[in-house]
C-alpha cells in the first residue's frame, strides 16, 4: 500500500520492449515499458490490452487503420485484434493486462520476454 | 481502439465521488473520478483496487497508517483492507478495478453509485 512514483520507476531501466512489472491486482498486472522502433505484428488471443501513453507518441498499426496515441492518451486493444506498435522516437507506456499475457502474443520471437521483471 | 484523451474525459464531469467508466477489459474497468472532502471507511472484500493520481494530493487512511499520494503516484489497496480516502483539495484519480466492485465496498450509503456511468 506504499505509494509508487511512476516516473521514478521509469528511471530504473533503459531497455526497450521489455515491460517491467510495478504491481499486481485481481489477476492483472500493471507494466511499464520504454519503446523505440518497430515491434512485430502479433495478437493476444485471450487478453484485452490497455496502453496508456506517459511520454512520447506511439503509433499502433491495425490491419485496417493506424492509430496515433499521444501523451495522456489511452487505447484498449480487444483480444484477437492483430496489431503492431511503432515508436519513431522513445515512448514511455503503461500497460494493464492479465498475468497470463505474453507481450508478443501468439508469436514467439527473440523479443519475447518470458517473465516480466519486477521493479 | 480509438484514442481516449484522459484529461479531456475529466472535463466532461464535475461531480465528486461518482466514478465514470472510460473503458472495460478482461472483466476489469477503468474509472475516472474527481474527489473532494472525506469519504467513508469501507472495505472491498473481493477486489483489489488501484489508485493513480492524475491531479492533486490524495490521503488514504488505513487503520494503522495514512498514505499521501501525489500527482503521478499510484497505490494498490489489497482486498479486505479497510480504507478511507481524504481529498483536502480537489483530486483527479484513475481507478482500475473489477466490474463487480462497489466504490463504497461493504458499506451501503448515499454515496453508493449503483452503476458507473460511461463517459
Image (cartoon, coloured by chain):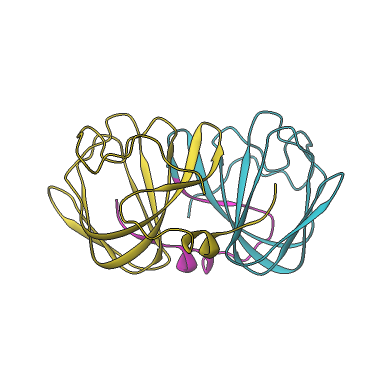
Chain colours: A cyan, B yellow
Query: Where are the magenta residues, as a range?
Result: A1-23
Q: Number of marks in the image?
A: 0
Establish if A64 lies above or below A119: above
Percent across and percent down for residue A38 are 81, 58
Place of residue B44 in the rendered image (x, y in percent of width and height, measured from the top left)? 28, 35
Q: Residue furthest right?
A: A64
Where residue A56 appears, as percent x and y from the top left, is 66, 69
**Residue B27 magenta:** no
> What residue occupies the far left of the structure in this picture?
B64
* Residue B99 position by quadrant: top left
Left or right: residue B45 versus residue B62 is right
Relative to A12, A56 lies left or right: right
User: Could you tell me which residue is drawn at 57 percent across and 41 percent down?
Assistant: A97
Q: Is residue A11 left or right of residue A82?
A: left
Residue A11 magenta-drawn?
yes
Front-lying residue, B55 or B15? B15
Q: Residue at x 17, y 47 (%)?
A: B40
Rendered image quadrant of residue B89: bottom left
Question: In which image quadrant can residue A86 be found?
Answer: bottom right
Q: Nearer the viewer, residue B44 or B23?
A: B23
At x 46%, y 63%, the residue is A6
Q: Residue at x 36, y 43 (%)?
A: B49
B44 on left or right of A91: left
Amino acid at each position: 500500500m506504499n505509494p509508487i512514483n511512476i516516473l521514478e520507476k521509469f528511471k530504473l531501466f533503459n531497455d526497450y520492449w521489455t515491460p517491467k512489472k510495478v504491481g499486481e491486482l485481481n489477476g492483472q498486472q500493471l507494466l511499464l515499458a520504454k519503446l523505440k522502433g518497430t515491434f512485430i505484428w502479433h495478437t493476444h488471443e485471450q487478453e484485452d490490452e490497455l496502453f496508456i501513453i506517459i511520454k512520447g507518441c506511439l503509433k499502433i498499426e491495425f490491419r485496417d487503420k493506424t492509430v496515433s496515441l499521444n501523451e495522456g492518451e489511452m487505447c484498449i486493444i480487444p483480444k484477437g485484434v492483430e496489431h503492431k506498435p511503432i515508436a519513431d522516437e522513445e515512448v514511455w507506456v503503461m500497460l494493464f493486462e492479465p498475468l497470463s499475457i505474453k507481450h508478443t502474443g501468439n508469436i514467439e520471437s527473440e523479443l519475447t520476454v518470458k517473465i516480466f521483471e519486477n521493479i
